[in-house]
Structure formats: structure tokens, C-alpha cells
Amino acid sequence: MKKLQSNSIPVSQEAIAGAALYSKFALFFYDIIVMLFENHFVWKCSTRKIISFYNTHISNKHLDVGVGTGYFLNNCKFPGKNPIIHLMDLNMNPLEKTSERIKRYSPVIHQWNILEPVQIDLPKFDSICISNILHCLPGDFNSKEIVFKNLRPFMNNNAILFGLTILGKDVNTGFLYKIFNSIYNKRLIFSNSNDSFADLEKILKSNFDYYELKLIGSVAMFSCKK
């Protein structure tokens, strides 16, 4: 693991609250709760479909932002044997867990708040993923649009930026969705009450020349090129 950590990271208390869930204790149970239960029965977008989504878009020069436990990076199929992987997250716990999990790839880690302009030394990438992070960031899509603006400069020509987020507005995938999404918003784990499919499409359209966006259950899956 190569570690490139910033000593001073600008961050709001709201952003800290969204990242605070990912303690070492919580990450120990994360895959069981999220990958085996919530994705299938709460959000109605199976882990298998998400891995397939990764397989379609991931490249051999990849940046993953909001890394979780590294489950998808560990289980997806890279197009080549020796991918270059960089990891970015505000919280060091997911960075350490993910880098250990995919240590066979010798990932480079960066601790940073993606709501702020990136002030760390990054190369350009052929693929960038922001998976399961937008619904944790404070505000609505008007304020979360800055994530796309901050990452766009690090895309190579013909690079693809892809990801997924759980929506909180104009979707209804059942009783469990209502309960879980409400609890997560009240505890500031999520901040997606005003996140709609239409608003996400609006910011993708304004920032990229090409995009694809689809809804599976309560999960919006997107890919875009500049």
C-alpha cells in the first residue's frame, strides 16, 4: 500500500457526519448488512448487478472515490492483470480496509474531502467511480454537483466516470426502503431526502457531453464522458 495523505483537509461538520459511520467496527459488518441484505431487499438493486456494472466500466487506470470496504474492487474484473488503482476517501478506516483487501494491486490511497477542489497530486484516469457516496454527502444535488466538477479534470480523453447512488425523492421500493432511508437520514448517515432522478440527470447533462442514467429499485446508476 502506498499512502499519500494530506495533513490538512477542509471539511464541514455535515460531511464528517456522513463519513463517521465507517468506523472499524461498522466496516466489520458492512458487507453482511449492505451486500447481502440491503442491496437485495431494501434498495432493490442486487450486489450482482452492481458488480456487473463495475465490470462494464472499470479500466486498468482507475480512481475509486468513497471506497467502502473495497468489496466491488475486490470482486470485479479488471481488463488487464496489473491495474493502477488509486483510492480516495475522507475517512482513513475505509481506505485502510480497502487497501488491505486489494493489496495485490498495490493501491495508492488519498485522504480527501471530495466536496472540496482536489489539492493533492493525482494523475489522470481512464475510469473514476463514485459509488454509494452521493447519498451520504450533505445537501441536495445542487450542492453535490461539485463532486463531478472536482473529478472531471482527472479524466483522460475518452475516460468514463461512473457510479451509483440511492435516491430519496420520487422513488418508493417498499416498506423496508421507507424505514431504512428515513432512519439513515435522521441519523445523518444519509442526506438524500431531496435527491431525485430528474435532478441527477440535470447535473449530468450540464457537466458531460455523454451520459447514461438508469434506475434499478431506488438506486440510480450512471456513467458519463466529457
Image (cartoon, rainbow, N blue to C red):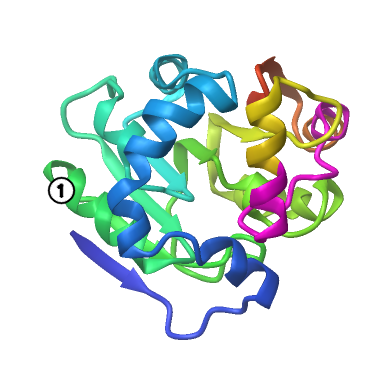
Looking at the image, the residue that sits furthest to the bottom is 8
Question: Does the magenta segment cover residue 188?
Answer: yes
Q: Which quarter of the rendering shows the C terminus?
A: top right
Figure check: 99 above or below 167: below
Residue 80 x, y percent position in the rendering: 22, 23
Query: Where does residue 132 sit, x and y in percent of width and height?
Result: 55, 41
The range drawn in magenta is: 182-201
Q: Let me know if residue 179 appears in the view.
A: yes
Q: Which residue is mark 1?
A: 103
Where is the N terminus found, in terms of image quarters? bottom left
The image quarter in which residue 179 lies: top right
Does residue 114 sit above or below 106 in this rendering? below
**Residue lying furthest left in this view?**
104
Q: Is residue 78 left or right of residue 198?
A: left
- Crowdedness near tag 1: few (<14), some (14–19) or many (≥20) residues, C-alpha within 10 Å: some
Please indicate whether residue 172 sits to the left or right of residue 121 in the image: right
Q: What's under tag 1, amino acid-wise?
A: Lys
Q: State the count of labels.
A: 1
Residue at figure coordinates x 55%, y 71% from the top left: 119
Q: Residue 108 in the image: state x and y as whole percent.
A: 28, 57
Q: Residue at x 69, y 70 (%)?
A: 14
Residue 33 place in picture, x, y as percent? 40, 38
**Who's the residue at 79% across and 24% down the image?**
171
Circle 1: element type: helix
Q: Is residue 224 visible?
A: no
Residue 162 in magenta?
no
The relative height of residue 177 versus residue 24 in the rendered view (above or below) is above
Tell me which residue sits at (28%, 24%) in the image: 78
Say left or right for 147 vs 98: right
**132 with respect to 104 (left or right):** right
Quadrant of the image occupied by residue 199: top right
